[in-house]
Amino acid sequence: MMKRKRRHTVALVMALALSAALAGGGPAHGTDKSEHPIPAPVENLRFELDVETVDTPQAMPDGVQAYNVETCTMLSARLKGYGLITGHHVYTYYHELEWCWDGDTITEIAHDYDDGVTYGATYYWRGNIAHSKSWSNWSGTRHGKYTTKTTGDFEQCTFIPWLSCVNSWQPWIKIVAYADGDHTTTGGGTS
């Protein structure tokens, strides 16, 4: 009889520990648990899109008159997903584009890259599920506009094997680059 009682106590302690872990008490990837709590399953997100650009004009020798000098622009877009209830940072989806232009034409796509990072023990980056690229006319120039759109896949899974994954998000970022160095960047996600 005493043995049976002990099993129930151990089972209860394990259930409480698992419940506490799923409700938000445990470190994520070896970090301080106050920094990245483990959220309760099935949480919707709010999104923030940050965009930074850096222009690097090509150097001209002294005394040379510049006409249609090529400039390259590096754009870094970061779409961050935050829990609506807890406010914690769940993931960041990156899309970087570097294009060179001379005012009339996009002369080169030097870098078009995307990746994802998660912040929590139950979140997983599953990779990209779509990446489209296209050229179109702009201001009468055949290669005046370049559009790239990426969609990533993130999941939230439990520590309980039979429950598997309880939530997934597919954030997307779209960058439209122009031959004058301008751009339009949008992003969002589904949950």
Image (cartoon, rainbow, N blue to C red):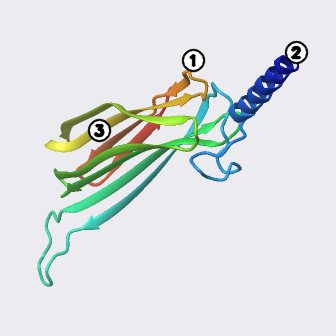
Quarter occupied by residue 63: bottom left
The reply to whether discs 2 and 1 touch (Cβ–Cβ < 8 Å) is no
Q: Which residue is mark 3?
A: 148
Q: Residues within 10 Å of mark 3 (few under 14, many from 20)?
A: some
The picture places residue 71, in percent across and down from the top left corner, at: 23, 62
Q: Residue beneath label 1, please?
A: 162
Q: Position of residue 46 (x, y in %)?
A: 60, 35
Q: Earlier in the sequence, mark 2 or mark 1?
A: 2
Disc 2 versus disc 3: distance between alpha carbons?
A: 67 Å
Horizontal placement of 61 versus 44: left or right? left
Locate the N terminus by quadrant: top right
Q: Amino acid at mark 1?
A: Trp
Q: What label sits on residue 1 in the rendered view?
A: 2
Label placed on residue 89:
none
Disc 3 versus disc 1: nearer the observer: 1
Residue at 68%, 48% in the rendered image: 33
Q: Residue at left 35%, top 43%?
A: 114
The residue positioned farthest toward the bottom in the image shown: 62
Which corner quadrant of the image does residue 125 belong to? top left
